[in-house]
Image (tube, rainbow, N blue to C red):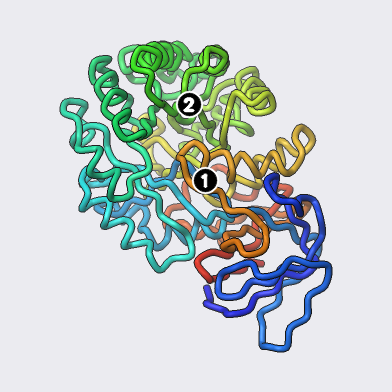
């Protein structure tokens, strides 16, 4: 990662739905972190760093809505340093960090700790704060204090809020400062002991099922409370047809609702679980082919607003064990774009694919969108959408290696990021 005064990107194709240069090949001159010139051919006399490669594309910097960094307290799984390195390798210039650390992120000092940790990194940290103290689902945190100190949203992460009055209180609370509640929806009673998706595979394997109904019930409840409070809600990492249908209805009724799906849900199905691979154990669970196709349809028709990594690093001791004992989660920051480009390249134009990991997530958070225009701050991701490559364990930057995608072949590769006057290039 280098601080370089003059950067020239040569003959790059600009993919930015908000820019007048969208879908055009140009040279881009960046001086002290600001885009100074966009033209067909740029020459300067001062020393400069030049990047030119075959089929090089650039877009506004990507942002991930759901990642876990481990730190503080869970550094054996991931540190902020390794997590942000993984994010940069995946093409992200900003990452929304979940508060489920030890101790959790639940005060203004906790939020300030994360922001300071990321100050000198090329990747921006966007902290979230807990909805309830210690994520114990009892008492509401001081969300406003965290908000004014930089928390972009509030969530108990994978611990779904089971108490309806508590969710009602949270949604009422954030209305006072136009805050955002993020909710992962699984009913604990219906989902009790759930290991994998309820279906033929769970029956064959003799594993406790996690029914789609567990997701549907809590989503219906949260949408009802959202309508009652007239607040703002983001439902995280949905996995089922019923979730898509109910969220689509809520959008039609003008509720202030948004949603995302984890990238791995678009490429995996529960049929892959027959060998008890713990790296396929996630929450919500990987569902069947009909749900996978429904999620893709939900992206195409706009019901699903964004795609996230749901990056969950797990140390080897908690994955290399029996399936029932293994922790839920996979790492994902380095494979988001490769997955969605491989799956969606024939379904969506490239600018719309990029919007799912750049423009749309920032709109959900109320963040300013970077734009590739002259005199704008350079917040840029470099990538090649046609490059075929294999994801190997050797190139994983995350401290944990819990991914089912080792040795998978993808089409489309992140190549680098530019942000805060810094540039980081990968091969």
Q: Is residue 5 left or right of residue 224?
A: right
Badge 1 element: loop
What x and y, as percent, mark residue 246? Answer: 52, 13
Report crowding for label 1: few under 14, some 14 to 19, many 20 or more residues within 10 A (C-alpha). Answer: many
Q: Is residue 250 left or right of residue 399?
A: right
Residue depicted at x 56% and y 52%: 334
Report crowding for label 2: few under 14, some 14 to 19, many 20 or more residues within 10 A (C-alpha). Answer: many
Among numbered discs 1 and 2, the one appearing first in the sequence = 2
Q: Which residue is mark 2?
A: 285
Q: Is residue 158 left or right of residue 246?
A: left
Examine the rendered structure and indicate whether residue 298 appears above or below residue 45: above
Examine the rendered structure and indicate whether residue 171 appears above or below residue 112: above
Residue depicted at x 47% and y 46%: 402
What x and y, as percent, mark residue 99? Answer: 31, 43
Mark drawn on residue 332: 1
Asked if residue 214 shows in the view, the reply is: no
Asked if residue 376 shows in the view, the reply is: yes
Mark drawn on residue 43: none
What is the count of numbered marks?
2
Residue depicted at x 35% and y 16%: 187
What x and y, as percent, mark residue 38? Answer: 74, 66
Gap between marks 1 and 2, in whole Å? Answer: 15 Å
Residue located farthest toward the left when viewing the structure as drawn: 139
């Amino acid at each position: 990662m280098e601080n370089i005064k003059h950067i020239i990107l040569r003959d790059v194709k600009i993919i930015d739905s908000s820019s007048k240069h969208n879908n055009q090949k140009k040279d881009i001159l960046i001086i002290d972190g600001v885009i100074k010139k966009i033209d067909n051919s740029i020459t300067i006399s001062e020393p400069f760093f030049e990047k030119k490669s075959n089929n090089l594309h650039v877009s506004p910097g990507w942002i991930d809505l759901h990642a876990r960094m481990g730190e503080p307290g869970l550094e054996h799984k991931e540190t902020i340093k390794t997590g942000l390195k993984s994010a940069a390798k995946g093409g992200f210039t900003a990452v929304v960090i979940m508060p489920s650390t030890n101790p959790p992120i639940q005060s203004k000092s906790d939020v300030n700790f994360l922001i300071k940790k990321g100050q000198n990194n090329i990747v921006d940290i966007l902290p979230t704060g807990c909805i309830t103290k210690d994520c114990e689902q009892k008492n509401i945190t001081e969300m406003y204090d965290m908000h004014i100190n930089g928390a972009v949203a509030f969530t108990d992460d994978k611990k779904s809020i089971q108490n309806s009055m508590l969710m009602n209180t949270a949604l009422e609370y954030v209305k006072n400062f136009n805050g955002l509640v993020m909710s992962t929806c699984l009913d604990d009673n219906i989902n009790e002991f759930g290991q994998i998706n309820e279906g033929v595979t769970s029956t064959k394997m003799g594993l406790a099922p996690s029914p789609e109904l567990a997701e549907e019930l809590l989503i219906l409840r949260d949408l009802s409370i959202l309508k009652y409070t007239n607040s703002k809600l983001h439902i995280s990492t949905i996995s089922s047809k019923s979730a898509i249908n109910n969220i689509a209805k809520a959008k039609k009724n003008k509720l202030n609702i948004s949603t995302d799906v984890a990238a791995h849900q678009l490429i995996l199905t529960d049929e892959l679980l027959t060998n008890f691979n713990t790296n396929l154990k996630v929450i919500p669970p990987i569902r069947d082919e009909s749900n996978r196709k429904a999620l893709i349809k939900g992206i195409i028709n706009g019901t699903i607003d964004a795609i996230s990594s749901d990056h969950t690093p797990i140390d080897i001791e908690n994955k290399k064990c029996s399936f029932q004992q293994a922790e839920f989660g996979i790492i994902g920051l380095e494979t988001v774009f490769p997955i969605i480009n491989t799956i969606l390249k024939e379904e969506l134009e490239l600018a719309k694919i990029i919007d799912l990991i750049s423009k749309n997530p920032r709109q959900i958070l109320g963040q300013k969108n970077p734009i590739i225009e002259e005199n704008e701050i350079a917040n840029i991701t470099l990538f090649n959408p046609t490059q075929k490559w294999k994801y190997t364990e050797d190139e994983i930057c995350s401290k944990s290696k819990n991914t089912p995608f080792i040795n998978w072949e993808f089409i489309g590769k992140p190549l680098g990021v530019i942000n805060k006057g810094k540039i980081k290039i990968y091969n």
